[in-house]
Amino acid sequence: MSTKDNWKIWEVFIRSKNGLSHKHVGSLHAPDAELALKNARDVYTRRNEGISIWVVPSDAITASSPDEKEPLFTPADDKVYRHPTFYDIPDEIGHM
């Protein structure tokens, strides 16, 4: 039997009806993925705004620190070909 003391923290991501990607909306405690999904639905989609929910255990997420910004992102500055200003995108390609 699970007690609330050993419930995991889950990060919740929701895709809105008019969105193309999932956005982080918050966190919650739950003993397993199934209950985390149900709780996320109840807590974060009260106004029927979502079409898809992801729940991810917080301990499964690896993130960079804002203090590491310079060494992590500076190498990308010298790769100008990655910037979309060099490409003509046809009008029929949406959401770019």
Image: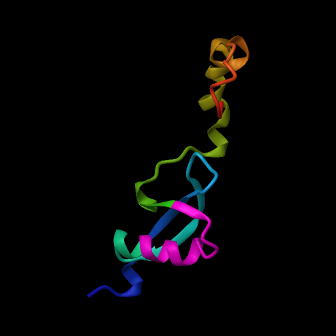
**Image-based side of 62 in relation to 79, left or right:** left
Looking at the rendered image, the quarter that the C terminus falls into is top right
- Location of residue 68 in the rendering, given as x and y in whole percent from the top left corner: 62, 38
**Colour pattern:** rainbow
Place residue 48 in its image quadrant: bottom right
- Location of residue 31 in the rendering, given as x and y in whole percent from the top left corner: 36, 77
Query: For residue 49: magenta?
Result: yes
Place residue 23 in its image quadrant: bottom right
What's drawn in magenta, residue-wise?
37-51
- Residue positioned most to the right: 85
Residue under the point 67% across and 18% down: 89
Q: Is residue 69 visible?
A: yes
Residue under the point 64% across and 12% down: 81
Query: For residue 20: magenta?
Result: no
- Location of residue 95 in the rendering, given as x and y in whole percent from the top left corner: 65, 34
Q: Is residue 8 visible?
A: no
Frontmost residue, 24 versus 77: 24
Q: Is residue 4 above or below residue 91?
A: below
Frontmost residue, 69 versus 94: 94
- Location of residue 93 in the rendering, given as x and y in whole percent from the top left corner: 62, 26
Place residue 82 in its image quadrant: top right
Looking at the rendered image, the quarter that the N terminus falls into is bottom left
**Image-based side of 16 in relation to 34, left or right:** right
**Image-based side of 48 in relation to 77, left or right:** left
- Residue positioned most to the left: 1
Residue under the point 38% across and 76% down: 35
Q: Is residue 5 above or below residue 53?
A: below
Residue under the point 65% across and 24% down: 92
Q: Is residue 20 above or below residue 40?
A: above
